[in-house]
């Protein structure tokens, strides 16, 4: 409810979207966190619904679950921008202020989802013993670096071998 209050009445009625420059990006950042939280709730429910109730089983699926939450949030950011575009075209509104606004809104939402992912992984790793503890930010940084290496190799037509999960900081358990 607080998010809806800050997104609509505060942003639109009090015109904070236009009068306070970063307000729009702050709202999109927090929407990324909220959508990732919803995504995590959905995947956790589904895993439990289909019989994965053992904490050790769920722990092993933490990284795929966090990835689902991230992509759920990312999809939500894209769908929202499509909604803004459609509403502006059909009703003549002014929610979209060009390509840069649209893309930076989606980036802000994705950064919020990454923040959620980092927090979730750090929290989960904090529950384990120190020998298996990794920093979530370090993990995400290594994953992004490996993704960039893969993209660069693919764009140059060079075959790229994906390293093991252990090489990007995922402890096996």
Image (cartoon, helix red, strand yellow):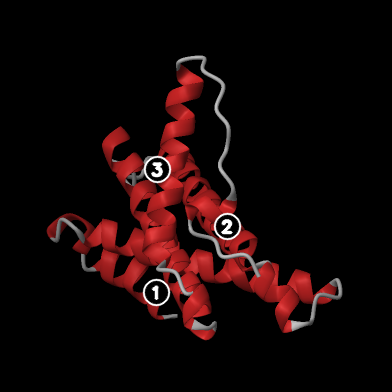
> Alpha-carbon distance for marks 3 and 2?
16 Å
Q: Which residue is mark 1?
A: 3
Q: Report whether residue 116 is seen.
A: yes
Q: Note whether 160 is above or below 111 in the view shown.
A: above
Query: Extreme right residue here?
Result: 51
Up/down of 159 relative to 35, above or below:
above
CB atoms at circles 1 and 3 under 8 Å apart? no
Q: Quadrant of residue 47?
A: bottom right
Question: Which disc is residue 126 wearing?
Answer: none
Q: Position of residue 32 (x, y in %)?
A: 43, 61
What residue is drawn where x is 35% and y is 61%? Answer: 29
Query: How far apart, in angstroms, are the residues tagged by discs 1 and 3?
Result: 33 Å
Q: Label 3: how many residues lie within 10 Å, few (<14), some (14-19) or many (20+)? A: few
Residue drawn where x is 70% and y is 74% of the image: 58
Which of 2/91 is in front? 2
Q: In front of the other: label 1 or label 2?
A: 2
Q: Earlier in the sequence, mark 1 or mark 3?
A: 1
Q: Secondary structure at mark 3?
A: helix
- Marks 1 and 3: which is nearer the front? 3
Residue tagged 3: 145
Q: CA distance from mark 1 to mark 2?
A: 23 Å
Q: Quadrant of the N terminus?
A: bottom left
| x then y, percent, for residue 94 | 31, 45
Q: Earlier in the sequence, mark 1 or mark 2?
A: 1
Q: Residue lying at the far top in this picture: please name it.
A: 157
Which circle marks residue 67 in the picture? Answer: 2
């Amino acid at each position: 409810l607080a998010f809806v209050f800050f997104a609509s009445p505060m942003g639109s009625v009090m015109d904070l979207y236009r009068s306070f420059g970063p307000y729009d990006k702050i709202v999109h950042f927090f929407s990324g966190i909220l959508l990732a939280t919803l995504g995590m709730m959905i995947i956790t429910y589904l895993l439990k619904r289909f019989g994965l109730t053992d904490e050790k089983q769920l722990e092993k699926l933490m990284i795929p679950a966090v990835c689902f939450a991230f992509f759920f949030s990312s999809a939500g950011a894209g769908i929202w921008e499509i909604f803004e575009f459609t509403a502006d075209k059909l009703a003549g509104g002014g929610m979209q202020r060009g390509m840069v606004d649209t893309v930076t809104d989606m980036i802000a939402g994705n950064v919020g989802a990454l923040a959620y992912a980092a927090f979730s992984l750090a929290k989960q790793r904090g529950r384990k013993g120190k020998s298996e503890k990794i920093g979530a930010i370090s993990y995400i940084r290594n994953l992004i670096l490996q993704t960039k290496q893969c993209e660069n190799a693919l764009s140059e037509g060079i075959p790229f071998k994906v390293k093991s999960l252990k090489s990007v900081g995922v402890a096996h358990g």
